[in-house]
Amino acid sequence: MTGTGALVRLILRRDRIRLPIWVLSIVGIVYASAVAVSDTYSTPDQITAYASTMGTSPAVIAMAGPPYALDTLGGILVYETSLTALVAVALMAIFLVVRHTRTEEEEGRTELLRSAVVGLHSPMTAALLVVVSACVLVGAGVGAAVASVDVPVRDSVLYGVSVTMFGVVFACVAAALAQVMTHARGAIGFSVGILGAAYLLRAVGDIRDGTLSWLSPMGWSQQVRAFGDERWWPMGISLGLAAAAVVAAALLAERRDLGAGIVPARPGPAQAAPMLSGPAGLALRLQRGSIIGWVAGVFIGGAAFGSMSREIQQMVESNPTLADFFASAGRATIVDAFLSTAMLMMSLLGAGFAVSSALRLRGEEASGRLEPLLATGLSRSRWMLGSLLVTLMGTAAVTAAGGIGIGLSHGLVSRDLSAVPEMLGYALVYLPSVLVLAALAVLLIGWLPRFAMAAWAALAMCFVVGWLGGLLEFPSWFENLSPFTHTPAVPTDDVAITPLVVLGLLVTLATSLGVVGFRRRDVG
């Protein structure tokens, strides 16, 4: 552990801007939601109406979690914000831990530090100390934000602890996977995949009998039942998993070479394939594993959503109040409303791949791997457009996978496989909106490369608008910043061609400007 304190100070110095942004953003969203909920549900009649509609909606249960204590203001607040807070704190933990462990090794900086008086476990320990502290700050801020609207403080603290422990679990899981994988993108990809699996297990479990929810860390955090019959003991399960992941990470670190992972990199063939002679082929080879992983993950997510359609239909048929609610909202069926929400979530996942794929351009440049390529006869424009072609193809594949997954499982449970091409078409309706975020990343890479990571902030904004926009009542100009606002909410809405064409033109313009900017500036 020698040198851990110095490394903690180094991490805090390097992330002096990144850390406050993460913490304040998560707490700020919860606080804004708390104020909005207290204003919207200020009377007993409004709270009762919420519990009788949203609390029995299988679509909302799948998205938000088990409907506990919805007859209280605090319970409604937890129901509205828990998914956002949990996913955000987990992503914060994953990105930060991998950044200060596997990424540092991959870039060679850990080897330089270890050549001084720095212990074997010091880098991982320092990263976990900082990230766990950040999770504690997030949990404390979330608890304080909830308590600010005159709800019981004890339950607010319990909610904050559940958020903290979820972040701690994924910080430790990411630390273990950073020992297993050779590259940072692999560690992040597997960590996010486990997060997605935790969400799906919880969603399917809560829609059905609740058994699967107990296999999910997200289920443990939501089973504390804040503002209801509060239970602290599920946090013990989370703590046990976190401790086991830390022990596993420490043991794995002792059994591998510095810079390598437990899973070794496979040696390549003696001769390169013909496809590697061009920039598009090289980009496809580099992103092949990422594309396959994203396609498989989004397909599984879509299939999980589609498989819930039968239970949703059965539950609404047994609840006349819920049927009247959707009828008054002008929606044909509750299944269409649920599938519309599922389409939005799958498209946001597709946008995650699009942004990460586009930002690989900046990663290749910053790592120094681009300059040797440009020293040959390869032009900047050809290299960039070849990589972006792979981004386009991969984004289309990931987006389509979500629609196929939804359509296939929905078709199987409804015994109507015509839903497969229908849902595929609906998924592709979101493709222009997804590509807008990738185009934004390209534009930033071309003109403001230091701020290229702001594309992730844009994706986070789109998620908040799509998921919490109705609750927070953002100004119309702010909601219109999200391209998903301008996309028809299929299948509940009819497909409109004009906004899709406009979004496509915007993608073309932003990408072209990004290429022009990259040609004009210095590399690196």
Image (tube, helix red, strand yellow):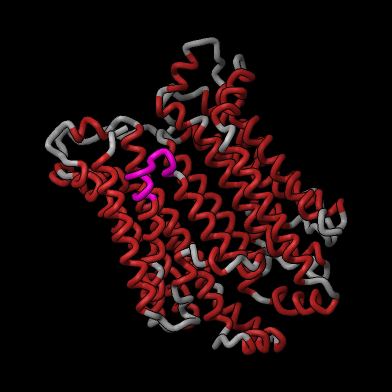
Determine if the magenta segment contains residue 128.
no
Identified at 34% across, 49% down, the residue is: 442
Residue at 69 percent of width and 64 percent of height: 80
Q: In this view, does 21 lie to the left or right of 50?
A: left
Q: In this view, does 232 lie above or below 149?
A: above
Q: Position of residue 12 (x, y in %)?
A: 60, 28
Q: Which of 482 and 365 is in front in this view?
A: 482
Percent x, y of residue 254: 52, 22
Residue at 71% from the left image edge and 40% from the top image edge: 137
In this rendering, does residue 207 appear at all? no
Residue 273 position in % (x across, y down):
15, 42
- Out of 499 and 398, give the one closest to the viewer: 499
Q: Quadrant of residue 149?
A: bottom right
**Which quadrant, please, contains the C terminus?**
top left
Q: In the picture shown, does residue 210 fall above or below 361?
A: below
Task: Say if 433 sits above or below 319 in the image.
Answer: above
Residue extent of the magenta highlight? 441-452
- The image shows residue 83, relative to residue 454, as above or below, that is below
**Which is the main secondary structure of the residues drawn in magenta?**
helix
